[in-house]
Image (tube, helix red, strand yellow):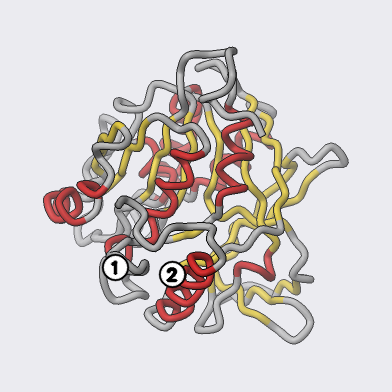
Amino acid sequence: MITFAETGGTNVKPTLLVLAAGMGTRYGGLKQMDVMGHSGEALLDYSVFDAIRAGFGKVVFIIRPDFADEFKTKVAARFDSRVEVDYAFQTLDALPAGYTPPAGREKPWGTAHAVLCARDVVREPFCVINADDFYGRPAYEAISAHLAGTSTQSTRFAMVGFTLRNTLSEHGTVTRGVCRTDAAGFLTDIAEMTKISRTDTGAVNREAGAPEILLTGNEPVSMNIWGFSPKLFDLLDSVFREFLGLAGHELKSECYLPVAVGSLVKNALVSCKVLRTDSEWFGITYREDKSRVQACISQLIKSGQYPANLWA
């Protein structure tokens, strides 16, 4: 495994960009700050810990202004002496000139918009993750190896592709970017499915007004762990403007990062290597997921993969 700390190809360490501005509607609260570890750690603490071990040099959190102070004192203060920390803010009115939110809109504009909100604070190759997902050390090592030596204008992107059956919740439907790849492992298409549930033979996606889509459970899926260069921001800006033109008048429409990347791939503007892994993934969508997540972390601590107190 090659990390930025070990490569002589560049002096720039990658940045970890953490999407932490979600409203936690299905969870019933700010899950990005909820305690999951033995010593008060949130799930994102484990992501930062793994990223530092893989050679990342900075962490940028995308949050909302309404909980910024609480987030900084309750979460980021635990490790801001160990890694450079910065912030970007996702707000409804953070839109290109000429666009305004429709009256009554409260829902954020989605993960693609969240990433765009960080364009002024991320100037190096970077990895995007969700704050409420546990990806495991191998995922960060794979992204770090991909980003090693990446130029700021590179259009060779990457994502870690988890196996669908390893990412489903026992407590309700989930949203997943289901991927197709070519023989060389590069992304050719990605479909954002928002109502996937487990079945006896695999999984099924049931969305209102659309036919059922049967899935084997073996499909690679995006869990929003991506490796990009800063070139992404200009490309993503164009995709987001197109989205606003089509759905910016709606109250709940979202511009999803996997769909945006899929569009860039289809238009041959970028390539995206899918780094397959069968590593353990777990995350928090529903309140009922919390006990399982805590049990998984306890087992990882017991097996010696993480200390009981990450930042002691």
Residue at the extreme bottom of the image, as rendered? 200
Answer above or below: position of 87 versus 231. Answer: below
* Mark 1: few/some/many CA within 10 Å (<14, 14-19, 20+): some
Give x and y (percent) for residue 121.
30, 27
Which quarter of the picture shows residue 105? bottom left
Q: Is residue 290 visible?
A: yes
Which residue is label 1 attached to? 34
Left or right: 172 in relation to 45 = right
Q: CA distance from mark 1 to mark 2?
A: 10 Å
Dot placed on the residue nearer the N-terminal end, 1 or 2: 1
Answer above or below: position of 177 versus 54. Answer: below
Which residue is label 2 attached to? 284
**Looking at the picture, which amino acid does disc 1 mark?**
Asp
C-beta proximity under 8 Å, tags 1 and 2: yes
Q: Is residue 92 visible?
A: no
Give x and y (percent) for residue 19.
37, 49
